[in-house]
Amino acid sequence: GHFFSAVVATVNGDGTFDLQCDDETVVQGVPRALVQLVEVTGKVAAALEREEEACVEGVDAFFNMFVQSLTSGAVFAKLSPEQKAVASEKVRGLRPHFEAELEAFRAERGLGATVTGEDIQAILPRVMARSRC
């Protein structure tokens, strides 16, 4: 089955839920057995509330956020231009690992879930671990 991101709008007397989806549509009468609570960390919840990231969709946009997170640190800034070029190429080589982790993340969070910069930071160690296998 498919999962999607929604918020419980109403708890009905018969034990079903009315769910409001990210696109503002409401799905009514969803049985409790089909609703799965997703825990969101405080940092992720805060980022979602602030809506600090514009709506980013597509693997390319997410990968660009990932690359930016790896190439914007102090260590990267201290590298020579040649070292930066090599490091950037290695980061771009992580794309298959990134795509696999992003797919796993989206499956866990649900289709349509918002992915924030905090989320990208959270999957970074998993991408690096996958690349070493």
Image: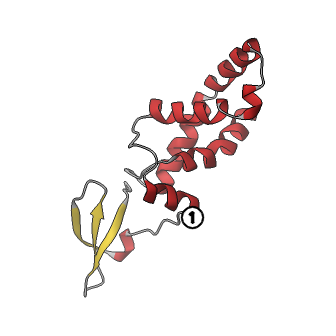
Q: Position of residue 14 (x, y in %)?
A: 25, 86
The type of residue carrying mark 1 is Gly
Q: Name the quadrant containing residue 79.
A: top right
Against 68, residue 113 (above or below) is below
Q: Residue at x 59, y 32 (%)?
A: 68
Q: Position of residue 96 (x, y in %)?
A: 58, 30
> In terms of depth relative to the viewer, which is nearer, 10 or 111?
10
- The reply to whether residue 41 is in sight is no
Q: Is residue 25 above or below residue 131?
A: below
Taking the spot 47% from the left edge, 51% from the top edge, the residue there is 107
Q: Badge 1 is on which residue?
A: 42
| Label 1: which secondary element | helix
Instruction: Find residue 56 and report its horizontal and vertical position in percent.
Output: 41, 40
**25 left or right of 71?**
left
Query: Which of these two is toward me, 128 or 2?
Result: 128
Quarter of the image where one finds residue 73 = top right
